[in-house]
Image: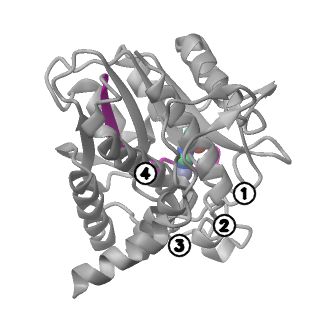
């Protein structure tokens, strides 16, 4: 009975995405259609566990959910469990989750994002909330939601082997427990990717390039070309922004201004020798981080399906046109 209900729910969910092809002007994309309704549902399901803060039951349960979800979409899943310490000395248990498609392929690309959420809403307008954990619907949840929907599309396409290249999704843990308050303590962030950078999930693992997703589901969101991405991997920035423009998402992947230098998980991948860019949301009004960043407003109510769609469809375009 439970199973039947699940399939009915899934059928209803997927009924929202019926278009067959992405066509812009005279360009017909080889990629399937990204379903923003399912990506949104995956964000909501993560948030339903409660804030995914380090060392919490909600964190651990959601880690299981993410790993199971990728397995259900046919991925080979690797786990990296590791101990680390926060900047204040608190011991934490981390879990990086890596989901691979075409694991035997020598040519690979990497798509990544963090799955933990921050335990302090220290940017909340109300100071009384500064020690309250956040849902991280956008900051954490959105990247994983988009990656899961890409994974589902890879499984659907698997029979016809449209995608020959290997694709690895890395869900970083412990990205968002860094020291705030303008402390400039860069190494206190991105602990999961720091660990992976020193010790890969598969010995000798490498990829042509990586794309890190961060805060890809907000309203009033635009993506500017981030500066570390521009210095380490300019051709990948061109590739992704070019793909977006080709399929009609140039408004989201903007050339209007350049982004700043942002300490994020892509830096660790670059320092580990794989060129990697950061697709990180900025606020359309002030150009800084999204207005809900590290506030209690970073919840499912403020997730925008059009933004998920723009990013997800662009990622499918990149994957399906990569030879
Ligand atoms: C710093 O604030 C140093 N880096 C931002 C990385 C981040 C936090 N992305 C999401 N949350
Ligand atoms: Zn954050």
Q: Residue at x 53, y 14 (%)?
A: 233
Disc 4 within 8 angstroms of ligand 1 (CB): no
Query: Whole-Å distance between the Cαs marked 3 and 1?
Result: 23 Å
Among numbered discs 1 and 2, the one appearing first in the sequence? 1
- Label 3: few (<14), some (14–19) or many (≥20) C-alpha neighbours in 10 Å: some
- Classify mark 2: residues with Cα within 10 Å, few (<14), some (14-19) or many (20+): some
Mark 1 Cα within 10 Å, few/some/many (few <14, many 20+)? many
Distance from label 4 to label 3 (Cα)? Answer: 30 Å
Colouring method of the image: one colour
Q: Which sits earlier in the primary sequence, circle 4 or circle 2?
A: 4
First in sequence, mark 4 or 1: give its number: 4
Image vertical order of residue 303 relative to residue 301, above or below: above
Q: Can you see residue 225? A: no
- The residue that disc 1 covers is 219
Work out whether residue 77 can be spotted.
yes
The magenta segment is 165-182
**If the image is split into quadrants, where does the N terminus sit?**
bottom left
Q: Secondary structure at mark 4?
A: helix
Position of residue 262 measured from the top left corner of the image (x, y, whole percent): 60, 32
Ligand 2 neighbours mark 2 (CB distance < 8 Å): no
Mark 4 against mark 3, which lies toward the viewer? Answer: 4
- Residue at the image position 60 percent from the left and 49 percent from the top: 309
Q: Which residue is mark 4?
A: 149
Q: Which residue is mark 3?
A: 132
Mark number for residue 302? 2
Q: CA distance from mark 1 to mark 2?
A: 7 Å
x%, y% of residue 220? 77, 53
Seen in the picture, residue 81 relative to 7 is either above or below; the reply is: above
Q: Is residue 321 left or right of residue 138?
A: left
> Could you tell me how far apart the alpha carbons at marks 4 and 2 are, in whole angstroms?
19 Å
């Amino acid at each position: 009975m439970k199973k039947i209900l699940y399939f009915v729910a899934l059928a209803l969910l997927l009924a929202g995405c019926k278009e067959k092809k992405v066509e812009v002007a005279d360009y017909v994309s080889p990629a399937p259609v990204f379903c923003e309704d399912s990506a949104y549902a995956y964000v909501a399901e993560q948030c339903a566990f409660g804030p995914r803060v380090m060392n919490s039951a909600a964190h651990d349960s959601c880690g299981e959910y993410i790993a199971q979800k990728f397995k259900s979409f046919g991925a080979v899943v690797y786990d990296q469990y590791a101990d680390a310490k926060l900047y204040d000395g608190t011991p934490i248990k981390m879990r990086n989750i890596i989901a691979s498609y075409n694991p035997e392929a020598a040519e690979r690309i990497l798509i990544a994002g963090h799955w933990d959420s921050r335990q302090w809403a220290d940017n909340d307008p109300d100071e009384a909330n500064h020690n309250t954990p956040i849902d991280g619907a956008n900051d954490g949840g959105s990247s994983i939601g988009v990656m899961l929907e890409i994974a589902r599309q890879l499984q659907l396409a698997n029979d016809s082997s449209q995608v020959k290249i290997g694709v690895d999704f890395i869900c970083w843990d412990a990205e968002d427990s860094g020291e705030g308050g303008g402390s400039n303590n860069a190494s206190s962030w991105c602990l999961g990717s720091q660990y992976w950078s020193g010790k890969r999930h598969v010995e000798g693992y490498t990829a042509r390039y990586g794309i890190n997703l961060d805060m890809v589901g907000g309203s009033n969101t635009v993506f500017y070309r981030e500066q570390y991405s521009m210095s380490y991997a300019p051709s990948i920035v061109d590739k992704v922004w070019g793909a977006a423009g080709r399929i009609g998402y140039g408004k989201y992947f903007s050339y209007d201004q350049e982004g700043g230098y942002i300490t994020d998980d892509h830096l660790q991948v670059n320092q580990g020798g794989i060129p990697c860019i950061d697709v990180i949301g900025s606020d359309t009004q002030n150009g800084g981080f999204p207005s809900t960043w590290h506030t209690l407003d970073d919840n499912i109510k403020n997730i925008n399906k059009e933004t998920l769609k723009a990013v997800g469809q662009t990622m499918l375009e990149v994957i399906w046109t990569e030879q």
